[in-house]
Image (tube, rainbow, N blue to C red):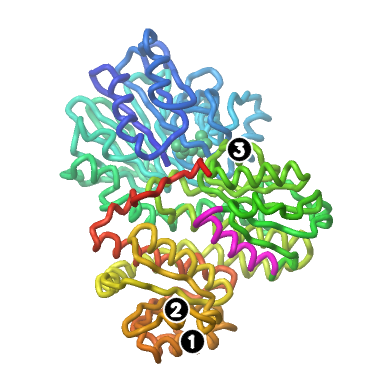
Amino acid sequence: MCGIVGYIGKNPAQSILIEGLKRLEYRGYDSAGIAIYNQEDINIMKTKGRLANLEEKLDGNHLEGTIGIGHTRWATHGAPSDHNSHPHASHNDKIVIVHNGIIENYMELRDELIEKGYAFKSETDTETVSHLVFDYYKESNDLFEAVMKAIKRLEGSYALGVLCKDNPEELIAARKDSPLIIGKGDGENFIASDIPAILEHTRDIYLLENGEAAVIKRDSIEIFDMEEKTVEKEIFHVDWDIASAEKGGYDHFMLKEIFEQPQVVKDTLLPRLTDKGVQLDDINLNKEDLDKINKIYMVACGTASYACLVGKYLLERVARVPVVAEVASEFRYREPILDENTLVIVVSQSGETADTLAALRMAKDAGARVMAVVNVVGSSIARDADDIFYTLAGPEIAVASTKAYSCQLGAMYLIAAHIAILKGKMSMEEYKELKDELMSIPDKIEKILDQQDAIKTLAEEYIAAKNVFYIGRGLDFAVCMEGSLKLKEIAYVHSEPYAAGELKHGPIALIEDDTLVFGIVTQEELNEKTISNLKEVKARGASIITIALEGNEKAKKISDHVIYVPRTHWMLTSILANIPQQLFAYYVSVGLGHDVDKPRNLAKSVTVE
Ligand code: HGA
């Protein structure tokens, strides 16, 4: 997530840090800051907002020094604000750090440190790390040792850059599950969360692996593993240009984001799964509140509205409460029946979607309780909702949503389980079974991504398709909706999603020789029905690609091609079945020569009606 840049060398650090952060702006951020050591103090300047705001603050307050760290923040814990911006200092400014990632056990660590007398200035998870490093540092006065001790206590993900007031000659870096690289220069070295930040200065890079840390001086870089044993690393010489470096070597942001899904889904799900149930920190809805709720509306726009559809199917089935899923632009104008016994769940990646925000405000005015599922901390929807579920997808750059949608589905699974448990409709045994499966979802996504080449070949085979149908039943119908939208929005191919049983009520008239039909077949009790519908279109000349659970021989038999996804709990198949659809739409779009990341007529955040 977002950006880290660090420098140790002979040149003024400020401009190197600011220019490096500018190279990371494409990743999205809400605040920025730098810390520079001037041989006496580590001076920090940070601010909410754009890098231009930081530059304004630095104008006339230039930070002197040749060693420093910089950060662009995309808030995950604590709203975007000056005091939540990085760098974060320990209580006497001795240790100063920048961090990308999420410290999952920060609450426990924070309590422990408060008990020891440390005072916190921010709401971030990151500040815990600066106090923790200091706490170890004061025992030994050895910065590297203190960082190693601290990171051994951290659960979650981190890329860290650490400075210490007593050590003007070194910069410490460490990473786990958040990217961090080291750039090797001549009498100067760099750290960065991504290559473009330092490409102007060096093309010789060490790629830090998970669990590695480094002591970086002007003339040396030493890399260690968690046992503090030296790691010998090959230099990676970068010959990409800046544009492809921004995409991490992928051709498009969309593909990069598709491949980030195992990690972001893990970030969204795992910290919330405890043995006692789902732990949702920003949701205060309790059993008593739920007993009063007699209806749930799930409201969103576009892709997020398909997450709502999945939410509706799950909540009704497992929590036994009536749910209406609806697009916000309709909901807000049709005078739905809302009162204090209604729960409205709104879903929005940006948290600024105009229709969804209007629906939220209307629901609140009518006395309903509003829960929001959003990706952007501190966004308008997050601020106005009573309960919040933050998806932890990180900034999504491609206009067409992929990783944010998968995290929204993750949110639906957890919210459905949480409400079902509170209402006494899901037993602990049932939850445990679901939890085990949820924990394996990131690896299963990885397995589907391994089929990238086969899906690319399929996309090439059907690149000339003019009309594509997606059919499925139940939860698979929601998968169809998203698959069809993705193909429309990035490949500009006309496609229709249909509940498989509806086909014969009209649209089957459109099926002719070689019409491409996707069959989504992951719901065991509905498989036979959907397969019958696929037979009907086959008989009329259609070509069929089926997305089915591993081992479904019947689906394979009636299809021209089958894409298998790993078996999982019935509630969770949509997140897996959707991944091949993303890759298919992506490769059709690439094959047709479209601007994948910025499709025509579309905007990332729809802040107008
Ligand atoms: N969790 C930290 C860091 C988030 C991040 O990686 N931003 O770029 C926070 O919320 O400050």
Question: Residue at 37% across / 35% down in the picture?
Answer: 173
- SS state under label 1: helix
Amino acid beneath label 2: Gly
Amino acid beneath label 1: Ile
- Judging by the rendered image, the residue that carries numbered circle 3 is 109
Q: Nearer the viewer, residue 432 or 172?
A: 432
Quadrant of the image occupied by residue 13:
top left
Question: Residue at 34% across / 65% down in the picture?
Answer: 493
Find the residue positioned furthest to the top: 60
Q: Is residue 226 visible?
A: no
Left or right side of 126 for 596:
left
- Judging by the rendered image, the residue that carries numbered circle 2 is 519
Q: Are marks 2 and 3 in contact (CB under 8 Å)?
A: no
Q: Are marks 1 and 2 in contact (CB under 8 Å)?
A: yes
- Judging by the rendered image, the residue that carries numbered circle 1 is 531
Amino acid beneath label 3: Leu
- Neighbor class of circle 1 (other Cα within 10 Å; few <14, some 14-19, many 20+) is many
Q: Nearer the viewer, residue 226 or 46?
A: 46
Q: Nearer the viewer, residue 193 or 540?
A: 540
Rounded to the nearest angstrom, the CA distance separating label 1 from label 2 is: 8 Å
Quadrant of the image occupied by residue 64:
top left
Task: Give, as a single range, the part of the protein colored magenta.
Answer: 301-316
Q: Is residue 145 above or below residue 523?
A: above
- SS state under label 3: helix
Q: Between label 2 and label 3, give the one nearer the viewer.
A: 2
- Neighbor class of circle 3 (other Cα within 10 Å; few <14, some 14-19, many 20+) is some
The location of residue 531, given as percent across then percent down, is 49, 87
Q: Kindly identify which numbered label has been placed on residue 281.
A: none
- SS state under label 2: strand
Question: Residue at 42% across / 28% down in the picture?
Answer: 143
The location of residue 3, given as percent across then percent down, is 38, 35
